[in-house]
Amino acid sequence: MELTVLAVKREDGLYHFNHPHNDTVEELLCNGTEDVIDTHYYFLTAREPKPGDEIQIYLTTEEPDDWDTKLTFMEADKEGSTYMDEVLCSHLWLCPWLQGYFGEIPDNLYVQVDVVNKGLKNFVKATGMKKLLDKK
């Protein structure tokens, strides 16, 4: 099973995302998750993220050919689940929304992250050069 979210950096340092599952609006990514996202953002851009910056996060329970990190389940309680980011060796917390989406708490999540280049998006929108946004 797969999940894709567009996480947006907020003024308070957290990230949020919207998703059609349960009509989710501005679901927070917090309790260590924001630090992990910041680090991946930095690795991709060589700069710290600023409020308004966006990062596309792809999660899947099936190991894909290409992934940036693997999240390994550590423990859960009624408040959420703790995972270990295997690349960063950092703990992060995921709320019960994830369990509701997947129908269970996944043992492993494979993650790919892509920084959204707003300048490129606007250029492509203005010129119609969609091929520039294609990954390969």
Image (cartoon, rainbow, N blue to C red):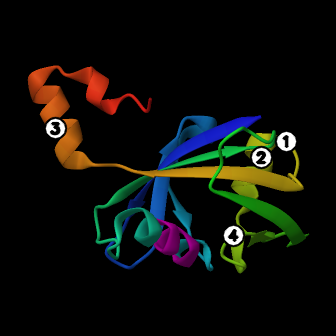
Q: Which residue has dot 4 on it? A: 87
* Quarter containing the N terminus: top right
Q: Which residue has dot 3 on it? A: 122
Q: Are the residues at dot 2 and dot 1 in contact (C-beta closer than 8 Å)? A: yes
Res. 12 mark? none
Look at discs 2 and 4 and give the one toward the viewer.
Answer: 4
Query: Callout 3, which amino acid?
Result: Asn
* Quarter containing the C terminus: top left
Look at discs 3 and 2 and give the one toward the viewer.
Answer: 3
Disc 2 from disc 4: Cα separation: 26 Å
Look at discs 1 and 4 and give the one toward the viewer.
Answer: 4
Relative side of 52 to 18, left or right? left
Disc 3 from disc 1: Cα separation: 37 Å
Q: Position of residue 104 (x, y in %)?
A: 88, 47
Q: Which residue has dot 1 on it? A: 103
**Which one is earlier in the sequence, the residue at label 4 or at label 3?**
4
Query: Callout 1, which amino acid?
Result: Gly
Range of magenta residues: 35-40
Query: Callout 4, which amino acid?
Result: Val
Query: Callout 2, which amino acid?
Result: Gly
Query: With respect to residue 121, does 107 lie above or below?
Result: below
**Which one is earlier in the sequence, the residue at label 1 or at label 4?**
4
Residue 124 quadrant: top left
Q: Is residue 37 magenta?
A: yes
